[in-house]
Amino acid sequence: MKKLDTPIGISGIAAYIPPYRVWLNDWCEWTGNQWPKIREVVGRSFRLRGSQHSVYTMAATAVIRLIDQYDIDPSRIKFLALGTESSTDNSAGAIIIKGMINEALISQNKQPISRSCEVPEFKHACLGGVYAMKGAVRHIALDGAGDQAIVVCADIAEYPLGSSGEPTQGAGAVAMLVEENPKLLEIDIMNSGSASDYRILDFRKPMIRFCKQKRRLDQQVQDFPVFNGKYSTTCYLDETLHALDDMYRKRKLNPIKYLRSLKTVFMHRPYRKMPETGLAIAYLFALSTGNSDDRAELTSYCYEAGIDPVNAINEMQEYSPDIKNLANPTDLNNEAYPMTMAILRIFRASRHYRREVLDKMALGSDTMLDLGNLYTAALPAWIAAGIEQALTENIDITGSEILTLGYGSGDAAEVIPFKVSKEWQEAAKNIQFAKAMSFAIDINEDQYINLHNGKSSEKLNYKPKNEFIIDGVGESAEKNYQDIGIEYHRYVK
């Protein structure tokens, strides 16, 4: 396997989660949805941003927490990257966060982030944060040797009322410290796998949706995506398989032996069932390339599903569907791999499913039931929650390989192996992910509708503390001075 001369990875993680919480069992009562199904497929609750929050306030709060929790010298930060699909400025990105952080640091008589710091923003749906992380590793491996980098993933997942995506909403930010000789996780980008293919209708955010929307302090811009749920699931599964295949080839791996060897897997998680389905499909495909015993296991599922094993294996190994062809009104509900999906239903009821899928995703999974979809921040949030659980429950993961998969609609996927550092416990003590989630305000239906509509709710009685807020929004469009739509921020101690 290829290796970097000096290991590079993550030495710290910190998060910001907004306090406004919607319990999904309450949401089911408001909307007439079935709670048992929502609980099984989606989770328990999700968070909403408030009128004082934006992707920039959440990201900046996560970053300043990272600096404080890990006693980082900001002057050493030479790469500050923002991964998001919720930015509201088409020109500036991470520089907004840098400015907010520096103002707060200087007010506290601390050193600001270095003037010679690069400030890119990475956008590719939910994969932008992973691309930002890879960019940070490449920076430190090349011209930024000896530097430190911060990658912050921040997003606001919103869907129209009554849509299938509504229960999968969420908001939050996760910041990561990236450096040489990492104290938490070594990132092995040399042996990662990549895949991408344009899918037309999967999940898009065309700018035409913003027409006629106003932007004031008491009215947030709403960013509801254009999406097709069943088709999006198909895209996720197909890109996952291709990214895994790329990694298998690079590392000359036996797919089924490798998947069985793993103890921990973290995948992009828009809702509870999606990553479980992704790993399960990957396992079935891996069985089709295995030895006679592996094929026998797959055959048993096939017979129970009433499917000819030869046809199923041909679908997994020989068939390469063009998912773009499903991007039309008549085919959006069709399966790309119909026999495999039928076999999956049998596999889920087998004794192997828990060991090969659920157990590998156990770390942090309970915490994630209360987060909702964080888009770019979903994967790093799960990693943070999982490592913190391993620390709390004295689960020894030292030196183990963790497989991660990031995915972004549109479509692209990145499979990246991580190696747990020897001193991970000390770094994990400062993650404080459970603390970031501990403060919550449970909201009722009227408050939910107000927040969902991007409006403030006077009855919430929330006083920000130790976080950034939107202090105002510019309205001037004069000849000699313009600030229309520009957010002004303030750090509240």
Image (cartoon, rainbow, N blue to C red):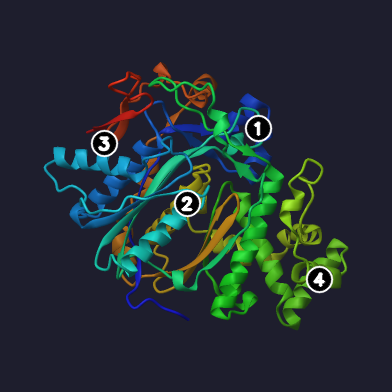
Relative image position of residue 358 (x, y in whole percent):
60, 60
**Residue 131 vertical position relative to residue 32 in the rendered view, above or below:** below
Q: Name the residue rendered at 86%, 67% in the picture.
A: 303
Q: Earlier in the sequence, mark 3 or mark 2?
A: 2
Q: In the displayed structure, does residue 231 sit left or right of residue 403?
A: right
Q: Earlier in the sequence, mark 1 or mark 3?
A: 1
Residue 147: quarter of image: bottom left
Q: Which residue is mark 2?
A: 128
Q: Residue 118 bears which disc, if any?
A: none
The answer to whether mark 4 and mark 2 are in CB contact below 8 A is no
Q: Which residue is mark 1?
A: 163
| Relative depth, front residue between 32 and 1 | 1
Q: Which residue is mark 3?
A: 466
Q: Name the residue rendered at 60%, 55% in the picture.
A: 275
Q: Nearer the viewer, mark 4 or mark 2?
A: 2
Please tell me how crowded label 2 is: few (under 14), some (14-19), or many (20+) other residues with Cα within 10 Å. many
Q: In the displayed structure, does residue 317 sit left or right of residue 459?
A: right
Q: Name the residue rendered at 52%, 23% in the picture.
A: 453
Q: Earlier in the sequence, mark 3 or mark 4?
A: 4
Name the secondary structure under disc 1.
Answer: loop
Name the secondary structure under disc 2.
Answer: helix
Q: In the displayed structure, does residue 432 sit left or right of residue 330?
A: left
Q: Earlier in the sequence, mark 1 or mark 4?
A: 1
Q: Amino acid at mark 2?
A: Gly
Q: Which residue is mark 4?
A: 314
Q: In the displayed structure, does residue 27 sit left or right of residue 477?
A: right
- Measure how far apart labels 1 and 4 are at the Cα level: 36 Å
